[in-house]
Amino acid sequence: VTKVAVIGGGVVGVAVTRALALAGVEATLLERLERLAGGASGGNSGILHTGFDSPAGELESRLIQRGAELREGLLDTLGVPVWRCGARMTPRDEEQRAAVLELHENARAAGIETTLGARGDLHVPGESVTDPVLYTRALAACAVAAGAELRLGARVVGLEARGAEIEVAIEGDARPLRVEVVVNCAGLYADEIARMVGDDRFAIYPRKGEFLVFSQPGGRLEEILLPIPSKLGKGVLVFPTVDGHVIAGPTAREREDKEDRSVEGDARELILTRALSICPSLAGQEPIAAYAGLRPAGRGVNYVIEPSPNAERLLHVAAIRSTGLSACLGIAEHVLALLAGRGLVEPRPAPTSPRMQRVPDADGSPWWKLAR
Ligand SMILES: Cc1cc2nc3c(=O)[nH]c(=O)nc-3n(C[C@H](O)[C@H](O)[C@H](O)COP(=O)(O)OP(=O)(O)OC[C@H]3O[C@@H](n4cnc5c(N)ncnc54)[C@H](O)[C@@H]3O)c2cc1C
């Protein structure tokens, strides 16, 4: 009997597996695809947020902030490309200036560094960009070096709770995997995993985000340009990538099809209209590529991190909609504490020098090419 099975090889599942392995807990990661980060984790903006604009007191905000603390130092140790370029938000009128001031106060209350410029623009030095696929792979390499097992092409098709065990049926396997605990990090399919034990309390739907990729337009973009957030969300941003491109996006479209990652016909216009207002130098530039990612959004819920009422040995880590890349290390620590608090795992103190391994060379493609 394996101690813990983690379902889902996105950045969240991988971070949870790593935390378990570093704490000496036997863990197996099951990913249905033949590669890691094939879901939301490979089709996002690749921005590592500080949480400066997250509402105080929410679990998501706490885990973003904790994630930011935990990754300092780790990224370099793992050899993950990261550019600590910072972000800027420039208000255009009085109403926006007031909104920016509010964000500045919010950040200060949370202890996150932001500075206000003379024209009322907000600078957030801690925001950075990375390659989210390499980050996921690096965490996985670290998990494996610490003793975790990684199974790609392993789609979970059934769960059966039997006393102190759960049987995990994997497509194509003659026998189920017997484990003591299952952690459900299945992204868009986390609701399907929950339904395998008759738990239908939450539903996950895809919120599509599309992006346009540009070669560097007229001069190098040196920071993330943020729009002033509105009720509709964070909006379209423009940011530099670690591989020397500039990306504008994402859109936010509520969709039904969990497999449809197409870039829709009007995406270009939707993105460009918004992007040009914060980055006029994009005018006249032709995008060299476009891609889309699907946020695993919960209907009316966000950050569902709790045991299933139908199976106490199944822990959901679901609806990690739009900040999972930033929060993954915080989420992983939280999950480990929840499991230990319920007596389901017995973590030993993390080794003083965790066994880590540098990320193996990828195939040379940045994530935005893999996402297409
Ligand atoms: C457009 C967009 C922009 C974003 N921008 C940012 C950003 O800038 N910064 C940030 O922090 N976050 C961002 N996010 C959010 C971030 O990408 C997600 O929060 C994060 O990737 C969620 O990770 P996950 O591991 O929970 O899900 P996923 O990455 O979707 O992983 C779930 C995995 O589970 C696997 N799986 C599903 N069902 C099964 C099964 N039955 N058996 C085995 N495996 C299964 C899937 O194949 C998948 O690999 C963005 C997201 C999108 C889409």
Image: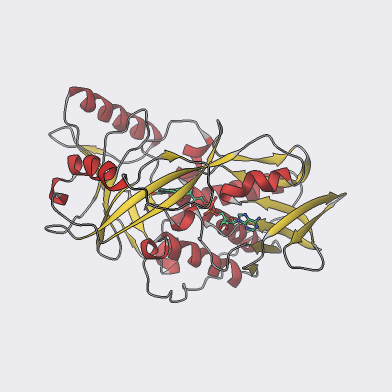
Viewer-nearest residue: 285 or 79: 285
User: What is the x, y in percent for residue 261?
Assistant: 45, 53
Can you say which quadrant of the picture contains the C terminus?
bottom left
Can you say which quadrant of the picture contains the N terminus?
bottom right
Whether residue 353 is visible, yes or no, is no
Image point 58% across, 66% down: which residue? 143
Whether residue 224 is visible, yes or no, is yes
**Is residue 368 depicted above or below 339 in this figure?**
below
Image point 22% across, 23% down: which residue? 95
> Does 356 sit left or right of 293 as displayed?
right
Write down the quadrant of residue 134 in the picture. Answer: bottom left
Image point 65% across, 62% down: which residue? 30
User: What is the x, y in percent for residue 73?
Assistant: 41, 60
**Is residue 169 depicted above or below 337 in this figure?**
below
User: What is the x, y in percent for residue 56?
Assistant: 44, 30
> Does 210 sit left or right of 152 as displayed?
left
Write down the quadrant of residue 122 in the picture. Answer: top left
**Is residue 84 depicted above or below 250 in this figure?**
below
Image point 41% across, 69% down: which residue? 79
In the orientation shown, which residue stands out farthest toward the front?
Answer: 265
- How many marks are shown on the rendered structure? 0
